[in-house]
Amino acid sequence: MDEMRLLQQLGDETELPTAERLSPARTRLTAAMTAESSVPMTSTAPSTLPRRRRPAWRLVLGGVASVGVAASLAAVLVLAPDRLGGSTPAARADATQVLRNAATAALRVPDVNPRPDQFVYSRSQEGRGMRESWMSVDGTRDGLIIETSASGRTESIVPGCRNGRAAVLKGDRVVPGETERCVPAPAYRADLPADAAAMRTFLIEHRQGEPGDANAAGKDVLYYLTGSYLRPRTLAALYEAAATTPDLQAVEHVKDGAGRSGIGITWPSTRGSGEIVLVFHPETYTFLGVGGSAGSSAVLALAIVDRVGQRS
């Protein structure tokens, strides 16, 4: 495809922004052009220029041969920054954009590849109740859950599944010498795709509801988001795939289980099931927790550790 046709296709697929939305970007662009033009054209000039915030623009423009096409494409990117992710204010962002921004934020998190013998540590809050858990990365080692509330503190062992057998629990205690059949439940989902398109296919193939059921699709996303540790690329793919779910809505000033305010993403709920809202930080777009009438919780800590009881 030649450059002009590529630009035409991009223009056809990009909605025109409003004047209010264009004003801040136009101001920043004018200021940047003025500053750059004032730098003397010497061999030392490049080192005095401020570092560009969007190196991806240079990568895109590097593949365009025509200077005129490159300039036009640059204008499209400057005036529609939300299409690149991470620059639309939460107060005006729609649900799709919030999830795309969350995907961009996920990719900034350091990537940790857990070892099979490690544990996923998490600390969460629901109202005044606190919950800590150490879950086996590969599901074969015994984990632990500690819950603290106004009524006291409880500890529950989570038996690992080794060679198809797991210890039997009676209440919160292991029954000596008794085992039962099991399937490992790894706390780290290494099998999930790290590509948005592949993740969409995975969610469709493993859906729990009927095709087109937005409520069920939303619950599937919530399951993978809160039920296991996901590496940055996989988490970003999950957010990108979730962004394609129909009928999502953005909810401003929603609170998670710790009372932190953020921007939420919700989907149509079935009658009597209550509303579930995914809550994201309004500026960084990191996942805070869950809010809504169906219940709330907050993610306070998440780490990969070497042993049960270790917190960092």
Image: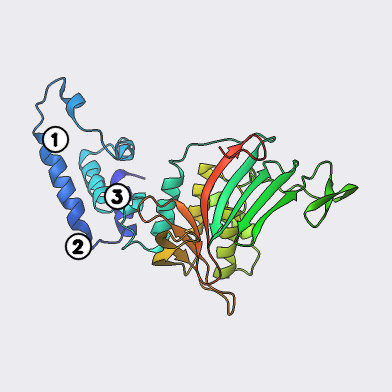
> Measured along the vertical axis of the image, is residue 50 above or below residue 159?
above
32 horizontally vs 11: left or right: left
Residue at left offset 60%, top offset 53%: 131
Q: Residue at x 56, y 41 (%)?
A: 303
Residue 227, disc: none
Q: Nearer the viewer, residue 259 or 154?
A: 154
Q: Which residue is mark 2?
A: 20
**134 sits to left or right of 176:** left
Query: Could you say whether the residue bearing mark 3 is in a helix, strand or loop?
Result: helix
Crowding at dot 1, Cα within 10 Å, few <14 / some 14-19 / many 20+, comes out as some
Residue indicated by mark 1:
36
- Residue 120: name its quadrant: top right
How has the structure been colored for display? rainbow
Instruction: Return the residue found at the far bottom.
Output: 271
Q: Which of the marked residues, 2 or 3, is nearer the chain's N terminus?
A: 3
The quadrant in which residue 97 appears is bottom left
Query: Spatial distance from mark 2 to mark 3, Cα to Cα?
Result: 24 Å
